[in-house]
Amino acid sequence: MVTCANERRFVAHLVGHHAMSERRACKATGFCRMTMRYRATRGNDTSLRERLKAIARERQRLGYGRLHVLLRREGFRVNHKRLFRHNP
């Protein structure tokens, strides 16, 4: 399995060293051109992370579902799936 970063590097190599267009390099390698253009954006969730860690230290027996309920009561609007990935 090739990661997106490796795909970008490979296509950039073809474009730079072999004077191919990005479109032709993507077509030759079978990579999607959308992968080359996509830039991930992440929100700043430091306050959420800190509060989640604090609650998890206080109440060690709680799972992410109950932590989600407590955070929602405090005003954090976060999806439970995202919270599951951040669970300390």
Image (spheres, grey):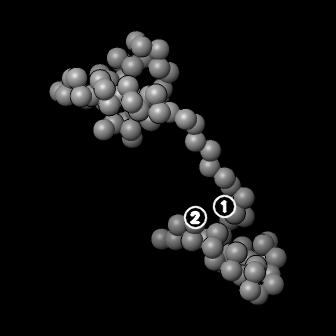
Farthest residue, direction left? 61
Q: Amino acid at mark 1?
A: Thr
Q: Classify 10 Å Cα crowding around label 1: few (below 14), some (14-19), many (20 and above).
A: few
Answer with mark 1 or mark 2, whichever residue precedes in sequence. Answer: 2
Q: Amino acid at mark 2?
A: Cys
Q: Which residue is mark 1?
A: 35
Residue 84 x %, y %? 37, 36
Q: Which residue is mark 2?
A: 4
CA gap, disc 1 and disc 2: 7 Å
Left or right for 6, reference 75: right
Left or right for 34, reference 62: right
Residue at image position (41%, 32%) is: 49
Q: Quadrant of residue 13?
A: bottom right
Instruction: Answer above or below: position of 19 versus 54.
Output: below
Residue 59 x %, y %? 21, 23
Residue 72 x %, y %? 42, 17
Tag 2's secondary structure?
Answer: helix
Left or right for 49, reference 45: left
State yes or no: discs 1 and 2 in contact (Cβ < 8 Å).
Answer: yes
Q: Report the number of discs.
A: 2
